[in-house]
Amino acid sequence: MEQFLLKQPDVIEWRADFFDRVDDTEQVLDVVNTIKKVIGDKPLIFTLRSVREGGHPVSLSDEEAIKLNAEVCRKTAAEYVDCELSNDPDHIRFLRQAAADCGKLVIGSFHDFNMTPSREVLLEKITAAERLGLDVAKVAVMPQSLEDVLTLLGVTLEAKRRVRIPLITMSMGKHGAVSRMMGGVFGSSLSFAVGALSSAPGQIPIDDLKTVFDIIDRAKGSGGNA
């Protein structure tokens, strides 16, 4: 943390599915509180990714994972928890209420590490997050072609106009790297960069990503029509 804090990230995510003691709630809470102590005011996303959506294998059931997220809301200062939209709707509603009671926010996420679903499917995933009362909608998909990347960016632009909650979208892998750099132009609120080790294919080192964002910001403020 001390190493990547020097790179000045805006938000930090802890992927708890890589933690060997993830089945020990008190240990997990201790780590979250330690991270928050070190990073201070920077927002923290607590993420426990399931194997079915590209995560590291863990011994927890879906229900146990949801309950752990709720405990993170109740007993730590983490601002966000990630909840996969593939969870049981009752479990999602349980976590949404637990988070709301503590003033925390829930990211409703969908991942496909094999393909890019159709425009209609992606829009449904995003609108489902809003319909379930979640605070942010996230979609991350794997493109098989540059056309798939255009699909993701087009969906992002359309969803920005349709939903009232913030969006996080990205296309993964080598084809999708451009979406991590340009997603904000189309309506994505956040991009994930490499601090020390990558957690998804196509992630870009934070120094490089910050340089790209600076160039885009300066170009958008130049007064041109592009």
Image (cartoon, rainbow, N blue to C red):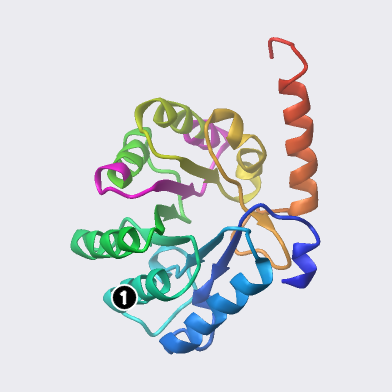
Report crowding for label 1: few under 14, some 14 to 19, many 20 or more residues within 10 A (C-alpha): some
Give above or below for 17 relative to 208: below
Q: What secondary structure is marked by label 1?
A: helix
Towards the viewer: 130 or 113: 130
User: In the rendered structure, which amino acid carries the disc numbered 1?
Assistant: Lys
114 is within the stretch colored magenta: no
Residue 146: in magenta span:
yes
Q: Which residue sits furthest left? A: 90
Q: Quadrant of the N terminus?
A: bottom right
- Say if 138 sits above or below 118 in the image: below
Q: Position of residue 100 (x, y in %)?
A: 32, 58
Q: Identify the residue at image location x=60%, y=39%.
A: 179
User: What is the total number of numbered labels drawn onto the structure image?
Assistant: 1
Q: Residue at x 39, y 66 (%)?
A: 52
Asked where in the image residue 64 lies, by quadrant, the reply is bottom left
What is the x, y in percent for residue 154?
A: 48, 28
User: Which residue has dot 1 on it?
Assistant: 67
- Closer to us: 32 or 86: 32
The part of the chain drawn in magenta is 130-152
Relative vertical location of residue 190 with respect to residue 220 in this rendering, above or below? below
The residue positioned 43% from the left and 61% from the top of the image is 82
The relative height of residue 137 versus residue 219 in the rendered view (above or below) is below
Snapshot quadrant of residue 50: bottom left
Is the C terminus in the top left, top right, bottom left or bottom right quadrant? top right
Q: Position of residue 35 (x, y in %)?
A: 61, 74
Residue at horizontal 28%, vertical 44%? 128
Foreground residue, 174 or 155? 155
